[in-house]
Amino acid sequence: MNQPADVAPVVSLANHAFFFDVDGTLAAIQSRPDEVFIPSSVITCLRKLSAASDNALALVSGRPLSELDALAAPLKLPLAGVHGAERRDAAGSLHRVSLPEEVTTPLAQRLRQALAAMPGTLLETKGMAFALHFRNAPEYAGAIQALAEEMVTQFPQLVLQPGKCVVEIKPEGVNKGAALRQFMQEAPFAGRIPVFVGDDLTDEAGFEVVTALGGYAIKVGDGKTQATHRLANVDAVYAWLEQLTLQLHQDTTLSVRS
Ligand SMILES: [Mg+2]
């Protein structure tokens, strides 16, 4: 595997489509998921980039759509939530993968009971997926992993999605790569070159797809990756977005002059 380039790629707002993970990419990680926010200056950049790229800018996250809308407010962007299990396309239509209640009800009950006995861990229920957080209780990492493995053995409709201080249980076939492929078949993304920025293991499926489509995959932070490019941290992402916005301003100035 080649090492990713330690710079952002050169992109054009006219030709590229932009996909961003949120936590650890557009927003610094906090000790609790509900403390995370996207700075208003970054929201402003996203608004400008979205407008300049004919709205070919989407968020692709493990969070539910409702939380993504709240984080990106007042923007109403195309979104893939819960790793693509729920998606709102650029036309505003919703696409949702669901699981039968015979699965979600006993699963939720079992997880609630098990995590109640592990102080400091946090169960996040997302309808068709569950996130088992242990950021504030790293001593339970092994127990959480074992519990999640037991659950996906019991329910073959489910798969594991490991992340940073979290293990998620989600429907089979759902991943960020599949969500990116769906967006890329639809206006205004189709025909553009995809750029996807993400920081975690869940983003690797997306990196694989954008690379296969001839685009750029940008990994935020350290760690082994299939990405083509790397940015050091969230601040480096902000600096790149700022730079793209300036590029936009120059492009506008040029077109006004000509
Ligand atoms: Mg992330």
Image (tube, grey):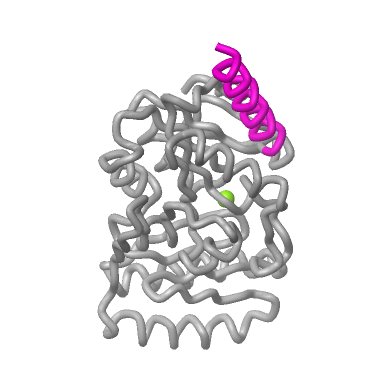
Taking the spot 59% from the left edge, 59% from the top edge, the residue there is 74
Identify which residue, 55 or 113, lies in the foreground.
Answer: 55
Secondary structure mostly taken by the magenta-highlighted segment of the chain:
helix
Is the residue 134 above or below the residue 50 in the image? below
Residue 125, horizontal then vertical, whole percent: 48, 76
Based on the picture, tell me whether residue 85 belongs to the magenta stretch. Answer: no
Left or right, 9 with reference to 80: right
Q: Which residues are magenta?
A: 238-258
Taking the spot 41% from the left edge, 41% from the top edge, the residue there is 206
Is the residue 203 above or below the residue 71 in the image? above
Is the residue 204 above or below the residue 251 in the image? below
Based on the picture, tell me whether residue 249 belongs to the magenta stretch. Answer: yes
Left or right, 196 with reference to 238: left
Identify which residue, 44 or 1, lies in the foreground.
Answer: 44
**Image-quadrant location for residue 122:** bottom right
Left or right, 120 with reference to 46: right
